[in-house]
Image: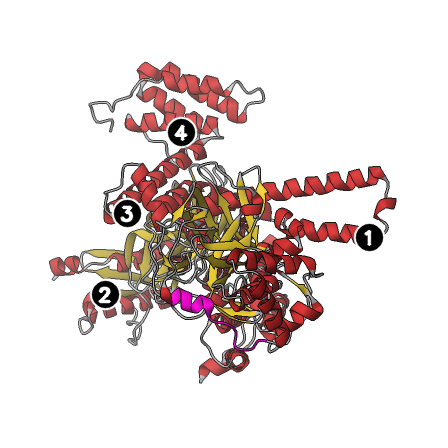
Amino acid sequence: MSVWTRPRLTSVIETTPLVGIVIGLVLGAIPLAPRLAGWVLGLFLVCCVARLVMNRPASRLPSLSVKMVLFALGVGGVGLTYGSMLGIDPGLSILLVLVSLKLIEANGERDFHVLALLGYFLALCDLFFSQDLLAWLYVALILVLLTATLVRFHRGADAGSYRRSTILAVTLLAQALPLVVLLFLFFPRVYGGFRFQFSQSLLGTGGMSDRLSPGSVSSLALSEQIAFRADFPDGSIPPMSSMYWRGGVLWRGEGLTWVAGPRLNQERRMGQLGGPGVRQRISLQPHGARWLFALDRPASEVRGATYQPGGYLQSRRTITSQFRYEVVSRPDNRETTLPPDQRLEAQRPPSVVSPRVEALVDEWKNQHAEPRERVEAALHFFRRERFSYTLSPGTYQDANALDTFLFERREGFCEHYAAAFATLMRLAGLPSRVIIGYHGGEFNALGRYVIVRQSDAHAWCEVWIKDSGWQRIDPTDMIAPERISSGLASYLESRAAQADPNAPQRSITAAGWLELQREMQRDARLLWDSINYQWDLRVLNFDEETQRSFLFSLGLGNVSWPEIVIWVGVVIALLLAVLALWMRRSRRGGDEVGHAYARFCQALERGGLRREQWEGPQHFGERAATRFAAQAEVIRQITSLYIQLRYGLTAPAPDSLVRAVRQLPRLTPPSRNPE
Amino acid sequence: MWYAGASQGNGAAYLLCFVLAGLALVSVVHAWTNLRGITIRAESIPPVFAGEDLAVPIVVSAQQGSHFALRILAYPGITSATIAELGVSRPQRAELRLPVLRRGCFRELPVRLRSSFPLGFFTARQILLLRQTFHVYPAPHGALPLPRALTPTRQPHSGTRVEGDDYGGVRAWQPGESQRHIDWKAAARGQPLLTKQWTGEVDEILRFDWQTLAALDTEARLSQLAKWVVLAERGPAAYELRLPGKTLPAARGTPHYHACLRALAEFTEIVEGEAG
């Protein structure tokens, strides 16, 4: 039991590197904070402070029993908080509990290394939650700090300023850069075959759901988060107002609530689409589901995706990291026959219909025989009655939602209009479905791409019209046409401006100034976004597929992976050798005089005369001059120059010594034995 | 970390892994360079008895550049010397301590030079041989009593003795002489250090003979002889050491003392074989 009675140790880690590592750990933990249990974060911070306090000269580190109790409490507490040890959040909490305990027990070199590695690991964990450039810059900051701290720690007791360590850390990082680029481009990327994958809970970014109920889209509408970015490699950019990004099709409707419905048979595809193709390259932010978006309507295969009935793309796997794909869309639809199972689904009327709704639809049916006319009548209804477009339409009770919406409240968001319209169409005998996705986006003129945000989420409706197929009808267009042409943000802004009675009183210059400021902000934002986009394209999306095509473009398409790995190893070894050589050379710089004299001594040593450890330059010079009588003059000159340079009051130019040493011919050991 | 990056298909995490890998590789080069061009010399190593700690004073110097966080230890060392920063024209002194168990005369001592600078991911190591002759005397052990004093011949054996009955004046103190005989009173008066001398006749000689210890094995014999030498040096008598092939005639004093112990340390079986 000597372990239990072992005396408590005093800290041997110096305070400065300890502060560095604590800051690094705290910085690493900050982005994880929202996913941690509050008490874990508290424990971590307390441990950070406690460890720093323990570093005071008289304090001692906690005893083993205290650590054991803390460990049991920490792990048990995580178990109790989450009810399980598995999963991301409990895992992160346990990680931080362990970091906390390691922190208070850390003492000595090995522990310090473990702490630094834990810091790097926390930084890595940060990257699983956010991968954009800003997050990476933050992680890079942690990286520099931790590396500098390691350098500072290893420099030992009188280490000098932190700045010197930081400079060395940055130097190390800079020297590592070629290796990083090489590894990044050539190290084989593998995907798949891993059993351990974070579920969508990791990202929790929200985004689309496959259920359209009142409030499901408007909850996204205020989120500025980016859903995806798209560029158009062929240069043909369709007008904003016709950018309907198709994400999913909902078949089953009940009043205002629509769901995806049953699996339908595969339909014949692509051939039925026409019109000019619009090629898009979309880089999708991870959203934790299987949505893939493309302009209405996608007409080409996408790797790793299936083409669903209803004409939309769906990823085969959950999208938990940046995903980039290319797709061609064609706007014209030439379908002429509706598959029977789709027809069945698209005509299934809602189970409950209120008398008022029934009356309304019957009126359309009686007045118009033509399907197109019925559609027009419905649209006219939306236009004529005073519907208003709002982000906060309140809640509609499920059973009677449609009736309340159509005849009483008449306030809604695009999802209400799409759902109501599709339901009305079914009642009117027309097959219909609801399409969800995004509409429009923000065009970044700098990078020539479109940014689509969660706030661009949209729902619209499609109606089957005999002989012309599925037709897109966007009832929101009837209610708030500006919303469709200008995007939500500016629409809301303009409405707010109208509502503001003070607006006209503002002086023109102030308004102009505000306008300019806003413009500049917008430009800065777009610039930042295009840098971010490049980051996404070049770094985040560099996956197995991109790597393969990159290798192909280098003409290495059919070189096997083991060969590439070997070559990468060889090139890395070469780079390191170059670095080692370069460091040898650069270290020599500085003491020109000393090096010249060292060369002189080496030359004499090759000639068989060695300078003794105790021997001064004068004595040695005399000895050398006697031994190599032929070169006595040069040797004396070198010696006197060296002595003047080192000890003289008036120093000659160091160059003269260097030149003199160069004059020394190659000396050979005398053939006879000098003894 | 790589696994995490790969399993999630996370480009940013991949990049972080590669940065760390690159950093580790570059730090290997830095660690090596940090040890390049360092020379360690040993200054003269005071002799010790086997079983004691040998203290090795060293001078560490660099040929070029600066070197950081060097750790030097003899194998199997008990204390290591740490040098925080070593510059070209600033050699540094340090001391290594190591336990020595075997007696003998040694000509070189391996030391380990290591440093995990700059990052600690990798520790560069180097083994250097310090060329320096030093003696480890046999441990003074043995239960046998001192042999009886021999030949009270009443012949002055070595003229002046350091110790004797009659005061014989003073002479200049020389380093290495026992401090017990310094004329401290004179020193207190401000005079240089003087050694008091006594003259007298040698009363007895102790003869320590290898051949008389036939019952013991070689090392035990050497230890016994060393013990006698140590005891005799404290006593008043002169002593003589007889080893196969080598005899140190009776004398006293520090140089004789060390000469005897060196002879014991250097003793080899071959000599014994030839003698026997």
Q: Give B268 or B38, whichever is nearer the viewer.
A: B38
From the top left corner, tell me how far across and down residue A247 is, in percent. Answer: 48, 57
Q: Which residue is under mark 4?
A: A598
Q: Which mark is residue B209?
A: 2
Residue A347 lies in magenta, yes or no?
yes
What's the CA distance linking mark 3 and mark 4?
43 Å
Residue A633 visible in the picture: yes
**For the residue marked with disc 2, what is the amino acid?**
Asp
Residue visible at 56% across and 77% down?
Answer: A352
Does residue A405 lie above or below A310 as drawn?
below
Residue A620 lies in magenta, yes or no?
no
Q: Give A387 or B198, whichever is nearer the viewer.
A: A387
Does residue A448 lie above or below A492 as drawn?
above
| Magenta segment | A341-353
- The quarter of the rendered structure image containing the N terminus of chain A is bottom left
N-term mark: 3 or 4: 3
Q: Could you tell me which chain the residue with mark 3 belongs to? A: A
Q: Which residue is under mark 3?
A: A565
Specify whether A392 is left or right of A563: right
**For the residue marked with disc 1, what is the amino acid?**
Asp
From the top left corner, tell me how far across and down residue A112 is, in percent. Answer: 49, 61
Q: Could you tell me which chain the residue with mark 4 belongs to? A: A
**For the residue marked with disc 4, what is the amino acid?**
Ala
